[in-house]
Image (tube, rainbow, N blue to C red):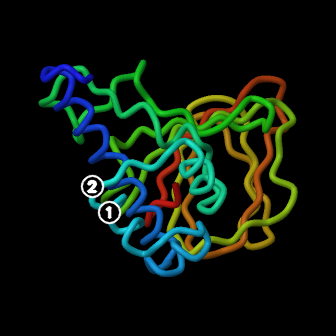
Amino acid sequence: MTSPAAQPDAQTGERFLAADIRALRKTRGLTLAEIALKLGRSVGWVSQVERGLSVPSLGDLRAMADLFEVPLSLFFSHDVPEETERGVVVRAGRRRSLGTSESGLVEELLSPDLGGSFEMLRSEFAPGAELKRAATRPTEEAGYVTSGIFEIEIDGVWHTLGEGDSFRFAGKPFRWRNPGAVPAVVIWVVSPPVY
């Protein structure tokens, strides 16, 4: 049985989970019916999840992570110690991690949630890591290199960036790589959010 004191925290976490799921669906331009069909669930259930009235199981969250092509960890860690900071402040030790070191790219969500018109990420690229196939997203993106050497190909042109350099592009194919011997760290802003 949940204690009355713990219940508001659980409900707040469920509200943020619901908002994240709704934001992911909308960002990808999917309807409730399309999500329900892909998950093998009813439209009513998906609607209840998005409104915080139903809580998805771990299996449902795994299916959603696969469907939205995001790491499962994105759906966790909504814990904020100070209620006045919820949805406003993200403390360094409480960022949501969005990748694994095996992929060569570890991202942390710097934005408090997935709502809003943009998201901000701290992206750390391991030495030698690269995105081999160009990606194109219906977004506007900008980045600022805080450390290391970072190379980005935008619309077929490679650019080598170092600490303090920045970039911006919209809806163009891009690839990246870290040719250096140390991690490259980029603060990346994406609008609309993709995670």
Amino acid at circle 1: Gln
Residue in the image at 44% along x and 47% along y: 120
Q: Considering only vertical position in the picture, is 190 above or below 41?
A: above
Please give the count of numbered marks on the rendered protein. 2
* CA distance separating discs 1 and 2: 5 Å
Q: Is residue 89 left or right of residue 138?
A: left
Q: Secondary structure at mark 1?
A: helix
User: Residue 37's quadrant in the figure?
Assistant: bottom right
Q: Considering only vertical position in the picture, is 3 above or below 177?
A: above
- Which tag, 1 or 2, sits closer to the chain's start? 1
10 Å crowding of disc 1: few (<14), some (14-19), many (20+): some
Amino acid at circle 2: Leu
Q: Secondary structure at mark 2?
A: loop
Q: Is residue 97 left or right of residue 53?
A: right
Q: Which mark is residue 153?
A: none
Residue in the image at 38% along x and 48% along y: 55
Q: Are marks 1 and 2 in contact (CB under 8 Å)?
A: yes
10 Å crowding of disc 2: few (<14), some (14-19), many (20+): some
In which quadrant is the N terminus drawn? top left
Residue 18 location (% of width, % of height): 34, 53
Q: Nearer the viewer, residue 34 or 140?
A: 34
Q: Which mark is residue 53?
A: 2
Q: Nearer the viewer, residue 11 or 188?
A: 11
Residue 48 location (% of width, % of height): 32, 63
Q: Considering only vertical position in the picture, is 95 above or below 72?
A: above
Residue 135 location (% of width, % of height): 73, 66
Residue in the image at 21% along x and 22% along y: 6
Residue in the image at 53% along x and 44% along y: 144
Per the image, the residue denoted by label 1 is 48
Q: Is residue 83 left or right of residue 159?
A: left
Residue 26 location (% of width, % of height): 42, 72
